[in-house]
Image (tube, coloured by chain):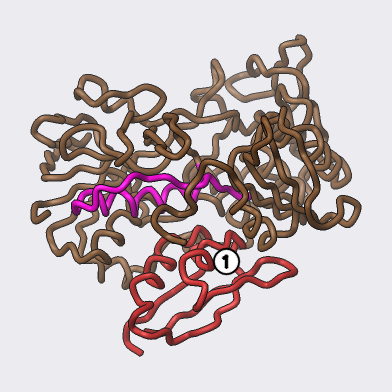
Chain colours: A red, B brown
Amino acid sequence: MKVTVDEDKCCGAGTCVMLAPDVFDQRDDDGIVILLDETPGEGLHAIVREAASVCPGVAISVSEDA
Amino acid sequence: MTGDVLVVGASAAGLATVEALRRKGYQGRVTVLGAEAHLPYDRPPLSKQVLAGTWTAEQAGLRTPDVLSALDAEFVLGDPAARLDAGARTVHTESGRALTADAVVLATGLRPRTLPGQDGLAGVHVLRTLDDALALRAELAPDKRVVVVGDGVLGAEIAATVCGLGVPVTLAGPQAAPLAYQFGPLAAGLLAELHTARGVELRLGAGVTGLSEVDGRVTGVRLETGEVLPAEVVVVAFGAAPATDWLAGSGVLCDNGVVCDSRCRTAEGIYAAGDVARWHHEGLDVLLRLENRTNATEQAVAVAGNILGEDRPYTPVPYFWTNQFDARIHVHGTLTADAEVSIVEGDLAAGRFVARYRRAGEVVGVLGWNMPKQARQHRQEIAGAVVLAGKP
């Protein structure tokens, strides 16, 4: 799994951080997403897919190929 | 669950329902019925990037066509639901289709409220759909004054965006300041100062009663005081109602939304998600209906789980954000104007702070002003709520 984030679309809700704090964080100054792990381990795939699906800014994409 | 699923509504909640079903391993047939002809798109950008013209319509799309097709769902678009037979779980559409499934998800969202005499009047707009946003944008010009009717989140965002385009704009509504009923005097007062400093003319504190017109084109907005605010373009954004008229006579209970139990179920095999759903929030012990973006997707996840037999209550912490000029405002919990407000981080003068709202000694909400991360970290303090049901 390969995760990408679009900082321009991120609204700073932090939904992804609450779901998967090992994969996502937020910048202190403006709350924009920080991708901590772009190839998370298999145990995190389901929650990362959920984070991408519920992201209110549509800022997270998941590719299953990598 | 091995039967078919029908999702009525192809916006954020409908799409998230399908994604959650697939993520949770459901391999059966899924049909998504959408009233609009567009592929699923996102609504929050409509009053911001799309109206400003900084995003194309395509950029507001929720998923690429490739990602959508990988869901292996059938999208039936441009065909509004017209009637539900709840006992048979059959939805009849305006074009005459009849779609039957073992589980039906109602996610038809909202319809904007309108003013008397608004229908068919040139120059008057609402903003709910992509087509609405593009039609409004096409009418904006520096020599045409816009009056926005509605001093809530949507109206204030529209006024800010229109002002940013160099178009003269007036914001009208009954509150003392934009969002005053929710934010209370401190934060709403800051918002009023911001709008005024950037050039929005605030005409607040008086309800709007109607429109004036000449030859079928709007000329102004009439206030309850009798005064008329001149306008070449009017945007009516003073609230919306759940889109449930098509459910009349279906047997599904509708009262300010589709009334559901704590599992977001309204009848055997029939669920509701998003703006249209009014469900029993077990954590707060109230019937709640939330008109916000995160609720659309999180409730959809709960509905998908309950369709598949998880049998879990949906107990979210309400959340929304709004961007107006350079203010990024994030709200967790439920703010009320009568709450006791204290600044717990940052500095009002610096335009960066977190405000905590208390009622009867309990924290009911948190507002972050240009401090999104810090506001989220304070949401743990909100009483009586479980953070993202089932997750730490």
| Residue B189 x %, y % | 82, 36
The residue depicted at 58 percent of the width and 59 percent of the height is: A13
The residue depicted at 20 percent of the width and 32 percent of the height is: B267
Q: Which residue is mark 1?
A: A9
Q: Is residue B215 left or right of residue B232?
A: left
The image quarter in which residue B269 lies: top left
Q: Is residue B301 magenta?
A: yes
The residue depicted at 16 percent of the width and 35 percent of the height is: B268
The image quarter in which residue B97 lies: top left
Q: Is residue B303 above or below residue B226?
A: below
Q: Residues within 10 Å of mark 1 (few under 14, many from 20)?
A: some
Outermost residue to the front: B361
Q: Is residue B269 left or right of residue B362?
A: left
The residue depicted at 78 percent of the width and 52 percent of the height is: B344
Chain of the residue where label 1 is placed in the rendered structure: A
| Residue B179 x %, y % | 70, 34
| Residue A51 x %, y % | 43, 66
Q: Is residue A38 magenta?
A: no
Q: Which residues are magenta?
A: B292-321
Q: Quadrant of the N terminus of chain B?
A: bottom left
Q: Which element carries disc 1, helix, strand or loop?
A: loop
The image quarter in which residue A36 lies: bottom right
